[in-house]
Image (cartoon, helix red, strand yellow):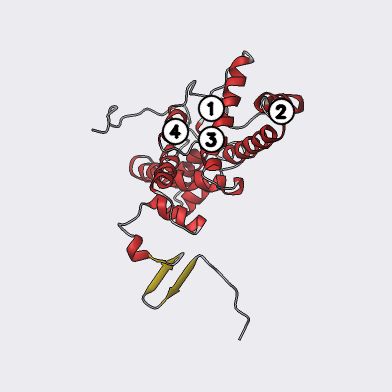
Amino acid sequence: MPDTWKTAVADVGPNKINLRGYPIAELMGGKTFAEVVWLALVGELPTPAQGRLLDAVLVSSVDHGVTPPSTLVALTAASTGAPVNAALAAGVLSVNRHHGGAVEDCMRALAEGIASQKEKGEGAARLLLAAYKEKGKRLAGFGHRLHTADPRSARLFALADELGLAADGVAMARALEREFAAGGKPLPLNVDGAIAAVLLDLGFEPALANAFFIIARMPGWLAHVREEWAREKPMRRIEPSAWEYDGPPERHIK
């Protein structure tokens, strides 16, 4: 018999499915999807505040229209007749450094700034921006091709404050945004930067950052793929700027 190897994630046997020790049947209807994602990754259930903030992170990136590269690729794959797994996989494979991957880069930059601040004191945000400028590097998580004030970022930070979970990550992101403004070239914190700051304050490592974007965006990709199959002809030429929205008008939660 071969030597056994160890896993602490799941214990599965006849009539038993336990995630980190918790029966799946008890988690079903008892905990939110975001709370169970936390459990799977961290090993323990989050506090209500942690679960609520992670849920907001996932909701913030659920969709951003038909023009992001990953959505266009998923639509193109669907148009060719690809099955749902292939169309979604195409979207996943399009998440890279310049799309979705900015969360990880921003987490690492924020962590660098936080470490510098603990070592050198105030002014770490200014020094970090100067170092990036000297190297000719763009600081991920700031600026957006569409939004001058990303509503998702503001909401995430407001929730982090409200729930008492805003810490060094949020503080450094805010300091960097102030430094951009003081330098005469205001660059708003985009949702990637806000997610990076919040994930740092929730204790997640940068290597997991892109996974949160993928988990969050999957329902959006699926909705677009489904619509592609239902409304469009196969093998069409998709022009990214030629879309027109015909869904419900803006509405609000009561």
Q: Nearer the viewer, mark 4 or mark 2?
A: 4
Q: Position of residue 204 (x, y in %)?
A: 55, 47
Q: Residues within 10 Å of mark 2 (few under 14, many from 20)?
A: few
Of marks 4 and 3, the one in the foreground:
4
Q: Of 209 and 31, which appears nearest the observer?
A: 31
As drawn, 196 above or below 190: below
Q: Residue 132, which numbered label? A: 2
SS at mark 4 in the image: helix
At label 1, the amino acid type is Leu
Image check: 249 left or right of 226? left
Q: Earlier in the sequence, mark 4 or mark 1?
A: 4
Q: Is residue 233 left or right of residue 190?
A: left
Q: Are marks 4 and 2 in contact (CB under 8 Å)?
A: no
Q: Report the disc number at residue 192.
A: 3
Q: What residue would you read off at disc 4?
A: 161
Tell me which amino acid carries mark 2: Tyr
The percent coordinates of residue 76 (x first, y second) are 48, 42
Q: Earlier in the sequence, mark 4 or mark 2?
A: 2
Residue at the extreme left of the image, as rendered:
254
N-terminal of the two: label 3 or label 2? 2
